[in-house]
Image (cartoon, helix red, strand yellow):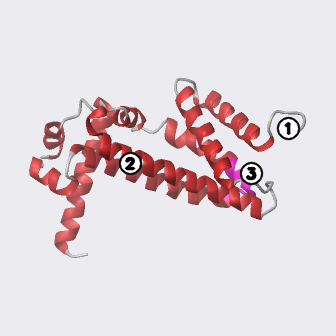
Amino acid sequence: MNKKQVQSELTRKKISDAARSLFVQKGYKATSIEDIVAATDSSKGNIYYHFKSKEGLFLYLLNEWDREWYEKWHESLPGYPTVTAKIYGLAQQIVQEDLNHPLTRAADEFFSNDEHKGEVAEKMESMIEEHLQFNRQLIQEGIDSGEFHIGDVDKKAVVLECLLAGLNQVCRKQSAEIVLEHYRFAVQTFLYGIARTEV
């Protein structure tokens, strides 16, 4: 990386760090490009050069959040000896990393904003597909190892995603301990069901 590229990366990081703090403090909508300019001593043109728009800057922060999430996930994998343990670990990481993440409130606001539907819809579709692919791989791994019954991996991946995403919406205002209990019970229900006999 040459000197110009290093400088560009440092500027990008300075802008994204300042914007993250503003989005956490003020929310997505209340944070303006002018606020980011003031916090970074950068020009509007410099911010637009690096991120194209306020939406582009927030999408960059969401991608960084995703990248950090997957890094933490891969670091935790050696602690899970089975796929069943991985699914419980997944629930725990969602509670620890997503529900308490500083950008959660701003992300909720961002995704409910009608002003930039195209870009947001595209990001949401991409995120959902990434989650489903993650779930498919996990479930297939369980089938391959003999832990799970053979069955429709795609449908199971969708059900797991709906279960985890739904809990994310319902449990937001509860304590982390209670939320984790709900997630563990949800995973147990997903893995073992509640009916006495199979229908």
Please tell me how crowded label 1 is: few (under 14), some (14-19), or many (20+) other residues with Cα within 10 Å. few
Name the quarter where the C terminus is drawn.
Answer: top right
Is residue 194 positioned above or below 160 on the image? above
Residue located at (50% from left, 54% from top): 130
From this viewpoint, is residue 156 visible?
yes
- Around disc 2, counting alpha carbons within 10 Å, would you say few (fewer than 14), some (14 to 19), or many (20 or more)? some
What residue appears at the point 64 percent right and 44 percent down from the top-left corner?
160
Secondary structure beneath label 2: helix
Between 130 and 76, the one nearer to me in the picture: 130
Residue 88 is situated, as x and y percent measured from the top left of the image, at: 69, 45
Residue in the image at 39% along x and 38% along y: 103
- Identity, as a three-letter code, of the amino acid under mark 1: Val
Q: Looking at the picture, does residue 129 appear above or below residue 103?
A: below
Q: Which residues are magenta?
A: 79-87
Task: Measuring from the top left, give residue 189's x and y in whole percent.
Answer: 75, 37
Distance, label 3 to label 1, CA atoms, is: 23 Å
Q: Mark 1 and mark 2 in contact? Answer it, CB < 8 Å.
A: no
Residue matched to label 2:
123
List the residue tagged with mark 1: 199
Q: Label 1: state its secondary structure.
A: loop
In the rendered structure, which amino acid carries the disc numbered 3? Thr
**Which residue is identified by label 3?**
84
Q: Is residue 82 magenta?
A: yes
